Image: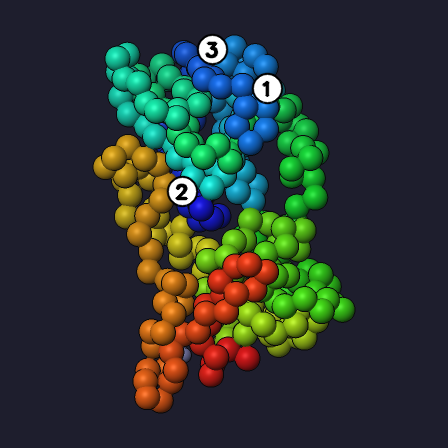
Amino acid sequence: MPELPEVETVMRGLAARLEGRTIVRAAVNRADLRWPIPMGLAKRLTGARVLSFRRRAKYILMRISGGDSLMLHLGMSGRMVIGPLNPNEVTLHEHLVLETDEGWRIGLVDPRRFGSLDLMPTDREDAHPLLAGLGPEPLTENFSVGHLSAALAGKRTPIKAALLDQRIVAGLGNIYVCEALFRARISPRRLAHTIPGARAQRLVPEVKATLIEAIAAGGSSLRDYVQPSGELGYFQHAWKVYGREGEACERCPGPPGCLGIRRVVQSGRSSFYCAPTQR
Ligand SMILES: [Zn+2]
């Protein structure tokens, strides 16, 4: 599932090809994904100029001339694929196709259809039901030690669950929460109300650094954020703890001195951590 850095690199890839361009043809190939696709979407996009992009949590917003924004979510398995225009090409599970005045063809491919598409006035983006209740963006100054401390005060859930709560901070997923907690030396099982103070001081910058490094890795490993296959975003990235059960972590010497990275299941999702150094 794409997480925030992947969505950010997908968005930058879209911006590289679409910003300032005119959409000469748009096609919507089904009536719904996770939710119904607005009627007349293809007609509204056709002829529009793409003004700018914005990411909010894991939603991509594409602002077009005429004052509307297309909102796109990649769901579990959605991919954006870009290539030169080829009229004979038929791509399976391609639900949205955009063709630009420069001859590029951009498709949304999503076999499992957990993604979504919606259209709204640009000046009402933040009032959209899927965006209205979101907490601050982790990479803005609104996600601060003060905000996090206030949000966690009195919370008796594990910090892992609290960081996945989109009302506390927007866009964090399982992988980056595991990574940030490792870097901040905080156990994913620690109760949230014990975080405010010194632990919050360590955690907030590590959340930001984890995301910034992953976004930078996407930018440096991909030309214009496009893979050789034409797929936007996504990139190889080495995790410090995620998916590394049983391996020695970079802080510990490994067996026999250390039992290695542990995996526990919290709220149905795997948490990976180093028990001796994450408290
Ligand atoms: Zn360790």
The residue under label 3 is: 47
Q: Is mark 1 within 8 Å of ligand 1?
A: no
Mark 1 touches mark 2? (CB < 8 Å) = no
Pointers 3 and 1 in contact (C-beta within 8 Å): no
Looking at the picture, how far across and down is residue 223, in whole percent? 27, 40
Vertical order, 143 against 84 (above or below): below
Instruction: Identify the residue at horizontal 28%, vertical 48% (top origin).
Output: 221
**Measured Cα–Cα span from mark 1 to mark 2:** 26 Å
**Percent x, y of residue 101:** 36, 14
Q: Which residue is mark 1?
A: 38
Residue sitting at x 40%, y 57%: 213
Provide residue 26's location: percent of width, then percent of height: 44, 15
Instruction: Look at 68% across and 60% down and name the residue there.
Output: 147
Figure check: 198 above or below 70: below
Looking at the image, residue 132 lies above or below residue 214: above
Residue nearest the viewer, comparing 256 with 50: 256
Q: Which residue is mark 2?
A: 9
Left or right of 78 in this view: 150: right
Q: Can I make out residue 141 in this image?
A: no
Q: Nearer the viewer, residue 274 or 205?
A: 274
**View extreme (right): residue:** 154
What is the quadrant of the C terminus in the image? bottom right
Q: Is residue 84 left or right of residue 126?
A: left
Q: Is residue 265 left or right of residue 237?
A: right
